[in-house]
Amino acid sequence: MDGVIMALNDMFLEELRNRNDIESVISSYVNLKRQGRILKGLCPFHNEKTPSFTVYPDTRSFYCFGCGAGGEVITFIRRIENYDFVEAVKFLADRAGMAMPEDNYDDSLAKHRQRILAANREAARFFHSSLMSPKGKAGLDYFLNRGLSMSTIKHFGLGYAPDSWHDLLNHMRSKGFTQNELFDADLVKRSEKNGKTNYYDNFRNRVMTPIIDLRGNVIGFGGRVLDDSKPKYVNTSDTLVYKKTNNVFALNFAKNGNPNSLIVCEGYMDVIALHQAGFTNSVASLGTALTKEQAGLISRYADEVILSYDNDEAGQEATKKAIRIFEGTGVKLRVLKLEGGKDPDEIIKTYGKERFKALLEGAANNVEYRLLRAREKYDLAFPDGRAAFLSEAASILAGCNAIEQDVYASRLADEMKVSKEAIQTEIRRQYAKRKAAERKQEFEKIVQETTVPKDEINPQRKENVRAAKAEDILLASVLNNPEFYLKLKNKLDENVFITDFNRRVFAVLSRRIEDNMSIDFSVLAGEFSPEENGRIAKFLAMKKEISNTLAECEDCIKVLIQEKQKKSVVDPSEMSDEEFLNAFRKRF
């Protein structure tokens, strides 16, 4: 079970889920399309091009056939918002206008998270106030010299960390925050000296940029030095409220800009400069490189992504990696070629926002960008340079659809003065090569999956495949047909189950049915972790795969009894003389 012990009663949880229709809640995060009685969309928990994320309104559950994520509405909020159970319940209660009951439940983790958020909010106020005070003049001058207006500085809540070891610590202590709370928020560091623990400010003599999530919470900070000293940047480490790989800078503002398009930049200052120039759909990843989680979050708020990374070697390498990541999200992708400056901020300062707007309008799609970069590597004045370029171009086009291949093959044939047929032949060769590599990779994956246990929810499954399949069918049958349990209870109890996880699920189901309590998935979720709920959601999704009959359940029980008997057989060579004699008498 999840670490938080819940005492929220079934009636409250049932009402909570009734008021938070699963289709409505998930639709605010995932673009769902109805297919008969179910809804499908791209999974928000892993990158995919073909929708495998399925919502079942009749069972008020969801399940992804791609990654195995599943559950009900509370589990969804826990996973998508990175909440514990109590926080997810409070989130949905607020959404529905419900008051939390006065039951005795442990919400210490939720309270600690709220204290860290409160500490971050107060720290942001302190940094901004410091920026506007005489001691923050160097920081304010830095921002003004970068071309930022006072309204932009206030809009983004920019600040300054004084050149002191304890200014923030002393201020926060005066506001009632403990040293441990500040340490857990990564606002202060600590050291041990002569058996004594000393605390000191994490951010000193730096301009500060608060990182704000989609709900307006300050979750972390980015601090930059005012000169060329090292380290240039000090950023909030991962905390209870912040994980840099899962968050995107300025998405709280950008999601209200252009509803269909987002510009993805490298750094905070690029984004801030673009917002000031009117490009309010700009965001940046946090950390050194874009992650799959960040790409998935961005793709939830845009149909089109325009990459605007720095025009240096590191920036172009980051562009290549970002293209590969975004290609797995299904969004339309374009790449900006920055001409006249190394980054968006420099281009706007030098040429004005109209120049950047023109660059946006002329941004190449990802295929054109990759062809352009390939072209720059070769000297096309010579035959061997043209041949090498066309070979790489064919490799790029091998990953495109037939229409794109035809269009670009025609264009390249005209430009390079070669036949279109020759280019198409090379595309087919590269396609065959790619497919062979994919088959090899798939084979290696299959081999790996058969030699390395992958099932973390039910690790005993690998050694008990036949039994586990029978258990799955029994659980799916009882979940979808609770009345089956009462008809089978004389033949079926938890001791029949072989794998521990399935046995635990059945124990919960049987206990609730015996006590005349609901086994609706919506009230079961609190008994299990989000990952375990994914497996239970899979059982519910099996409804169409099984016959849903008592006869099928009885067959499964027989299979489990047989598997139990197999396990009870002991190798005669390992028996004592007395054990062997007793076994012999039983058989004859």
Image: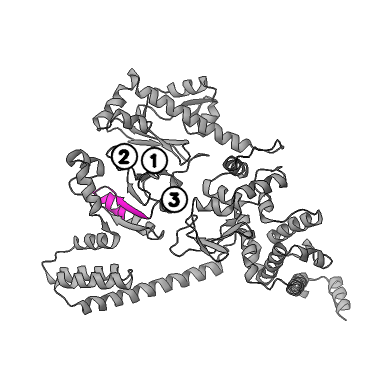
**Quadrant in which residue 96 is drawn:** top right
- Answer with mark 2 or mark 1, whichever residue precedes in sequence: 1
Could you tell me the amino acid type at mark 2? Answer: His
Q: Which residues are magenta?
A: 303-319
Q: Image height check: is 249 above or below 457? A: above
Label 3 belongs to which residue? 297
Label 2 and label 1: CA atoms lie apart by: 9 Å
Question: Is 375 within the magenta?
Answer: no
Query: Residue 536 bears which disc, if any?
Result: none
Kindly identify which residue carries mark 1: 253
Mark closest to the chain's N terminus, 2 or 3: 2
Q: Nearer the viewer, residue 142 or 570?
A: 142
| Label 1 element class | helix
Separation (CA) of disc 1 from disc 3: 14 Å
Residue at mark 2? 275
**In terms of secondary structure, where does tag 2 sit?**
helix
Q: Residue at x 33, y 57 (%)?
A: 333
Q: Are marks 2 and 1 in contact (CB under 8 Å)?
A: yes
Residue 517 placement (x, y as % from top left)? 77, 53
Q: Quadrant for the C terminus, please.
A: bottom right
